[in-house]
Each structure stands twice: as structure tokens, then as C-alpha cells.
Image (cartoon, helix red, strand yellow):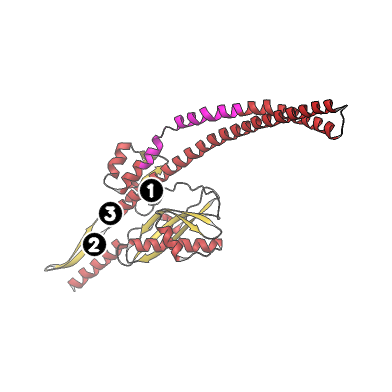
Amino acid sequence: MKNQIILTIALLMIGIVSSAQKLPDWIVNKPTPTNSTYLYVVESATGQTEMQARNRAIGEVFRSTAMRIGQPIDSEEINRALQRGTEYYVISSQYNVPINKVCEYTDNKTLPCRVYVLCQVAKAGNIRVEFDDFNACFEGANKYFADEALYADGFSISQNGKKLSDHEIRTMFANSNSYSLYDEGMRSADIDFETIEGWSQGLGIPSITVGVIFQGVFWPLYGKANKDAKDYKYRIDTHQYYDYQDHQYLQKLYDENLEKAEKYKRFAKTGLWLIGGGAVLMIAENLMEKAIISSGKAKIRKAVNLYNNGRMYSQSVEINYGLTGNGIYLTLSF
């Protein structure tokens, strides 16, 4: 009887501990997007490994997205997309829909295990999506994780409300995949954009200025020379001349003004090219800067997600129990 009581208590403790870890809040209550370009999708799936369960869960995101946009998507396309990392695309004959995985959670370590994924998904196809950073992946899952989790804000990383130094972050990320991602992201922040901007403006602004001057000077000259050439041509065609010598003189004036008009037109077109080239150079520099910064922030965010995932899984509860000569033993490892 005593052994039965001990066994019952042990099994109850096992059940309590195994169910003690609360699911993250985002599984039950999907977050609200901060803009109208995307929405949040939560899907889950089981598998014999975490990788298998994760891929199946992401596959479910693909399928639900394809149904929402009314476009079929085959399994081969899903498999190709899964090779790209944490940023995916639903591609069909008509739509390109970005999908960004921001959180994942493994419910347990037993087989089959269940993995939940939280994804930001474009609200419609072929639109410019403004995904925002989401830093609440582990809030509500466990107070320890909420306190110890890292949070990315652009190129800054904080923990429990404290902004971490570069040295602290590199120490925490040492010997992990997070380190290389963080290093690549921070290199984007270290680029001297002011020098690049100054270089593009140093070429772009003078180019636009010279182009405007060319336009202001040569378009009026082209207009006058072209008008005079047309007038002389009209007089020749309508025989408004006195004799052969006068006809030759009108022909000479027509040829000269036509040549001037073509020359002024080339200069005026050159002005247009200078204006357009200068504007394109400055716009391209601005777009390149934004793309580099966005890519850098995305790498920082991925580094943080990798670190948080590693911390979360390393803190899983391990339960060992068995029989001894004195009864049943139960060991909890945190």
C-alpha cells in the first residue's frame, strides 16, 4: 500500500511538472499587426523530430496562406521555400507573398513533438510589406525565459529592460550561430553611410545643376533655330523668293538653322540625361542605404531568436525516476 501511494504521488508529480510550462501567449492570443500590410498566422504540427515538426508547421502556414489568396501551391514549392531560412515566400503564377517566421515553440521533448510557429504574412500578394520587429516570443511561456530572453530593437539588444553592450552580447553569443549573424548585422550598422551619401550628392547635385542649366539655355535656342528653319523651308516650298540666287540664300539659311537646331537639341537632351542620372544616383543611394540597414536589423533579430530558442530548449525540465530498494526515486533536472 505504501509503495502504491509513493508511486501515485510520483506519477502525479510527473504530470504536474510536465504540464507546468505554460504555452506562450502568442499561441493563444495572436498579436495585432502595427500596420495594414501584414497579418499574424499561428500554425502547429507534430513530427518525429523538431525539424520535421517545424517544417510541417511552416508548411501549414503556406497552405493556409495559399487558401486565403486563392492560389494553389504544391509541395515542391513549399520544400524549396523551406530551404531559404526564416524568411519565406509563397510563389504562384500570379502572386509573391512574403512570410516571415518570428517565433517558434516546442511543446514537449517527447515523440512525436509538437512545434508551434508564429509568422508575419503579407496581407495580399505583390505588395510592399512593412514587417515590424516582434519581441514577445517567450513572454508568458515561463517567467525565467521572459526575464532572460533577449529583445532586438534595430541594432540594439536588451535583456530584462537593460541595454546590453557589444562586449556583453558577443560574450553571450560566443560559440553559437548567433555570433556570426550578429557580427554580420553590426557590420551593416558600421558602414559609413554619410560618406556614401556625400559621394552620391557630390556627383548627383552637380549633375542635376548642370542639367538644369543645359535645359534652360539650349531648349530655347533649339526652339528658335527650329522655328527659323521651318520658316525658311516654308518660303522655299511656296516659292517666296525673287530669283535663283535668293533661292540659294534661303536654302543656306535653312540648312544652317536646321544644323543649329539639331546641335541645340543634343545639348538639351544631354541636360535631361544629367538631371535624370543625378536623381537616379541619389535615389539609388537612399534605397541601398535602407536595404543594407533593413538587412542588418533582420540579421540581429535572427541572432536573438536563435539565442532565445537555445536558452529555452536548454532549460527544459528533465525527469528521471525508477525503483530502488527503498522505493521509488524521482529526480527533476532544470
The residue to which callout 2 is attached is: 319
Q: Position of residue 313 (x, y in %)?
A: 30, 55
Q: Amino acid at mark 1?
A: Lys
Q: Secondary structure at mark 1?
A: helix
> Magenta segment, which residues?
184-210
The residue to which callout 1 is attached is: 302
Q: Nearer the viewer, residue 288 or 60?
A: 288
Residue 160 seen in this snapshot: no
* Residue at 36% across, 54% down: 141
Q: Position of residue 316 (x, y in %)?
A: 28, 57
The residue to which callout 3 is attached is: 314
Q: Earlier in the sequence, mark 3 or mark 1?
A: 1
Q: Position of residue 210 (x, y in %)?
A: 60, 26
Q: Nearer the viewer, residue 267 or 205?
A: 267
Q: Amino acid at mark 2?
A: Ile
| Quarter holding residue 17 | bottom left
Pointer 2 local density, CA inside 10 Å: few below 14, some 14–19, many at least 20:
some
